[in-house]
C-alpha cells in the first residue's frame, strides 16, 4: 500500500526569485538590442522601397518625354505642380521670374527687371497629359520666340523646370480613384529637376586656321561657336568676330545649333521624400539619356508654344 504521508512530505521543485530575476535581465538585454536594430531595418526597407519606386517612375517619365507622348492624361493624377524659373539674358537686359502651373491654374510672376514674362511660355494648366509632357520637355536655352538654342552666348532665355509628383508606382491604396485628402497628403512624393539640354561641344580653340583663306574655306571661332565660310579668295583676312564677318566671309548655320535640332540630352534629378512644407529629404537619383530626333515646336489651342519630341523625325536647321 502506497505511503501517502511520505508523498505529502516531499518538497516541490520551483524557480527561486534570484533565478527569475536573472532570466528577466537576460531577456531585457536581448530586447534592448532588438529594439535598437529594428528602426534601422525599417528605415532600410523604406529607403529600398522608395528608391525602387523612383527608378520605375523615372524610366516611365523619361520614355514619355523621349516619345513626345500626348495621350497620357493619367499624369494629371500624379504631377500636381510644375514651376519654370526663367531668366532673360543678353548684353542689355537681365530679367527673371517664374511660371507656376497646377491642375486648375497657371500664372506668371516677374521677380526682377521691368519686362514682362516671355510671351511664348505656355500658361496652360496641368489638366492634360500633353501639357505636362510639353512643360517637362521645355529646352534649357531658348530665344525670345521659344526656339531652342545651343547656348546663351548671344543672349536668350534660360529655363529651369521643377516638377512636384506623387509616385506613379507604389501602393494601390494611394492611387486614383482615391480622393481622400489625407491619403493623398501621406502618399510618397518627390521633386524633379528637369533639364532638356543641348549637346555640349568642344570646337577648336580660337581659329581653326589663321592665314591663306580661300573661296569656300570654313573657319570656326571657339568663343561663340560660330562657323564662317569664305566668299572668295581672302588670303590672310580672317572674319571680324566683334563687328561682323566683313566683306570676305558669310556666316553659316551655327554647328551647335544644327546639332541641337537633332540630338539633345535629358537630365532628370529626383529628390525625395517631399515633405509637407515642400522641402525634400536627403535622397536623390540622377537619370540621363541622349534623345535623338526633332524637338518639335507647336502651338496649343491658346496659341502658346509647346514642345514635343519626334524621335522618328530629323530636320536640317534653316
Image (cartoon, helix red, strand yellow):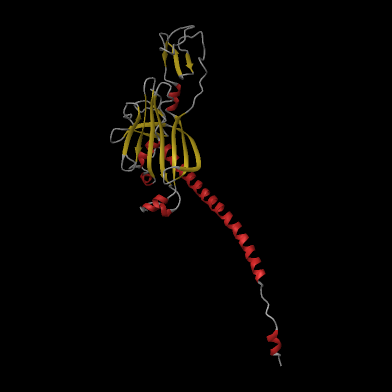
Q: What residue is rendered at 33% in x and 33% in y?
A: 109
Q: What residue is rendered at 51% in x and 46% in y?
A: 51
Q: Quadrant of residue 63?
A: top left
Residue 106 visible from this viewpoint: yes
Q: Quadrant of the N terminus?
A: bottom right
Q: Is residue 53 above or below residue 318?
A: below
Q: Position of residue 287 (x, y in %)?
A: 49, 38
Q: Is residue 165 left or right of residue 5?
A: left
The single residue placed furthest to the bottom in the displayed view is 1
The single residue placed furthest to the left in the displayed view is 302
Q: Is residue 14 above or below residue 55?
A: below
Name the foreground residue: 223 vs 44. Answer: 44
Q: Quadrant of the C terminus?
A: top left
Residue 70 visible from this viewpoint: no
Q: What residue is rendered at 49% in x and 24% in y?
A: 201
Q: Quadrant of residue 246?
A: top left
Q: Is residue 219 left or right of residue 23?
A: left
Q: Position of residue 221 (x, y in %)?
A: 48, 16
Q: Is residue 302 above or below residue 25?
A: above
Q: Position of residue 280 (x, y in %)?
A: 46, 43
Name the foreground residue: 150 vs 252. Answer: 150
Q: Position of residue 84 (x, y in %)?
A: 38, 35
Q: Is residue 177 above or below residue 92?
A: below
Q: What residue is rendered at 31% in x and 35% in y?
A: 300
Name the foreground residue: 242 vs 97. Answer: 97
Amino acid at each position: 500500500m502506497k505511503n501517502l504521508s511520505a508523498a505529502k512530505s516531499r518538497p516541490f521543485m520551483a524557480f527561486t526569485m534570484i533565478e527569475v530575476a536573472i532570466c528577466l535581465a537576460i531577456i531585457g538585454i536581448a530586447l534592448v538590442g532588438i529594439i535598437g536594430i529594428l528602426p534601422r531595418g525599417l528605415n532600410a526597407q523604406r529607403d529600398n522601397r522608395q528608391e525602387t519606386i523612383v527608378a520605375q517612375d523615372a524610366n516611365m517619365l523619361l520614355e514619355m518625354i523621349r516619345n513626345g507622348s500626348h495621350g497620357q492624361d493619367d499624369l494629371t493624377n500624379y504631377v500636381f505642380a510644375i514651376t519654370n524659373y526663367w531668366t532673360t539674358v543678353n548684353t542689355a537686359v537681365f530679367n527673371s521670374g517664374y511660371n507656376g502651373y497646377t491642375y486648375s491654374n497657371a500664372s506668371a510672376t516677374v521677380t526682377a527687371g521691368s519686362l514682362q514674362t516671355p510671351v511664348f511660355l505656355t500658361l496652360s494648366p496641368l489638366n492634360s497629359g500633353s501639357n505636362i509632357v510639353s512643360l517637362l520637355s521645355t529646352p534649357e536655352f531658348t530665344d525670345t520666340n521659344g526656339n531652342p538654342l545651343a547656348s546663351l552666348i548671344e543672349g536668350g532665355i534660360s529655363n529651369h523646370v521643377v516638377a512636384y509628383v506623387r509616385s506613379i508606382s507604389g501602393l494601390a491604396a494611394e492611387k486614383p480613384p482615391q480622393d481622400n485628402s489625407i491619403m493623398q497628403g501621406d502618399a510618397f512624393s518627390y521633386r524633379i529637376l528637369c533639364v532638356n539640354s543641348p549637346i555640349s561641344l568642344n570646337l577648336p580653340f580660337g581659329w581653326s586656321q589663321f592665314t591663306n583663306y580661300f573661296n569656300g574655306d570654313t573657319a570656326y571661332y571657339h568663343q561663340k561657336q560660330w562657323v564662317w565660310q569664305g566668299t572668295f579668295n581672302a588670303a590672310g583676312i580672317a572674319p571680324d568676330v566683334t563687328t561682323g564677318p566683313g566683306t570676305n566671309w558669310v556666316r553659316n548655320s551655327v554647328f551647335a545649333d544644327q546639332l541641337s535640332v537633332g540630338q539633345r540630352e535629358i537630365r532628370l534629378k529626383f529628390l525625395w521624400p517631399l515633405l509637407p512644407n515642400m522641402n525634400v529629404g536627403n535622397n536623390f537619383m540622377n537619370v540621363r539619356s541622349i534623345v535623338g530626333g526633332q524637338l518639335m515646336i507647336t502651338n496649343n489651342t491658346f496659341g502658346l508654344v509647346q514642345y514635343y519630341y519626334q524621335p522618328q523625325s530629323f530636320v536640317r536647321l534653316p
